[in-house]
Image (cartoon, grey):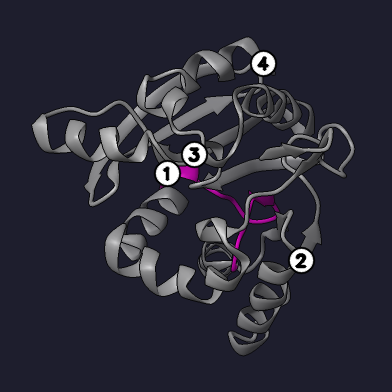
């Protein structure tokens, strides 16, 4: 999220609106997308009737995976980019999926308190400034029901020479420093979430991808 003229605005996928159509193939071939997103859905342990938010849904790849794996769940995707939501709606229609896709910002969610059983987030937090990361964590806490869970896949602390090298390059782009320095768990705890854990990590061309889970207390 960037501040321009005192007004917050979203960062488009790949930082440039004209590059948005390239986002899906790039992530598919460089980030082991099919594997890590299916694993994130599995980690979330979604049940029939659960209401699930895909936070920063982009082109709805994860949103569609959730609905396909759990057709009786109520699945909602939210993104701040109108153009990427147009692509998401076209993908959902092509997949024969009925999914709510909403326009809105992660740090100002347009939902009431306790609206969701699960919030999933894939490659979103590293787009946000530190203050927006913190506010987004507070918003996630607010919209989760008591006992509801957050599940995140995003850049995390590098382990090993190759991942440290990849992270050193990515640090120059967007707002990745807090991710690579391992600050996300503390932000989740500061927002009131508990049982914050890093469950696994994947090596990718752009750096380590960490899985996190957290829960709103009962």
Dot 4 or dot 3, earlier in sequence: 3
Residue at horizontal 36%, vertical 52%? Answer: 39
- Nearest the viewer among 4 and 161 is 4
Spatial CA span between label 3 and label 1: 10 Å
Which of discs 2 and 3 lies nearer the camera? The answer is: 2
Distance between the alpha carbons at the discs numbered 4 and 3: 15 Å
Residue under pointer 1: 43
Quadrant location of the N terminus in the rendered image: top right
Q: In the figure, residue 63 lies in which quadrant?
A: bottom right
Image quarter of residue 64: bottom right
* Residue 95: % across, % down: 58, 84
Q: Dot 3 corresponds to which residue?
A: 152
168 to 77, vertically: above or below: above
Inter-mark Cα distance, 4 to 1:
21 Å
- 162 in the magenta segment: no
N-term-proximal mark, 4 vs 1: 1
The alpha-carbon separation of the residues under discs 2 and 1 comes to 29 Å
Q: Secondary structure at mark 1?
A: helix
Discs 4/1, front: 4
Which residue is drawn at the image coordinates 59% and 51% (left, top)? 47
Q: Residues within 10 Å of mark 3 (few under 14, many from 20)?
A: many
Q: Which mark is residue 82?
A: 2
In terms of secondary structure, where does tag 4 sit?
Answer: loop
Q: Which residues are magenta?
A: 43-59
């Amino acid at each position: 999220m960037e501040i321009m003229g005192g007004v917050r605005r979203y960062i488009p996928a790949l930082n440039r609106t004209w590059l948005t159509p390239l986002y899906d193939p790039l992530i598919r071939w460089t980030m082991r997308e099919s594997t890590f997103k299916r694993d994130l859905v599995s980690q979330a342990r979604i049940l029939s009737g659960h209401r699930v938010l895909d936070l920063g849904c982009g082109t709805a790849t994860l949103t569609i995976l959730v609905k396909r794996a759990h057709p009786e769940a109520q699945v909602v995707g939210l993104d701040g980019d109108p153009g990427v939501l147009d692509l998401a709606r076209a993908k959902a229609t092509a997949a024969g999926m009925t999914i709510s896709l909403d326009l809105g910002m992660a740090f100002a969610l347009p939902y009431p308190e306790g609206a969701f059983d699960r919030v999933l987030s894939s490659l979103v937090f590293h787009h946000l400034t530190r203050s927006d990361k913190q506010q987004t964590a507070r918003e996630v806490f607010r919209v989760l029901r008591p006992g509801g869970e957050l599940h995140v896949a995003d850049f995390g602390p590098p382990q090993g020479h190759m991942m440290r090298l990849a992270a050193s390059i990515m640090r120059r782009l967007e707002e990745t420093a807090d991710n690579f320095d391992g600050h996300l768990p503390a932000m989740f705890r500061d927002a009131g979430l508990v049982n914050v854990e890093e469950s696994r990590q994947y090596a990718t061309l752009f750096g380590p991808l960490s899985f996190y889970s957290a829960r709103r207390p009962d």
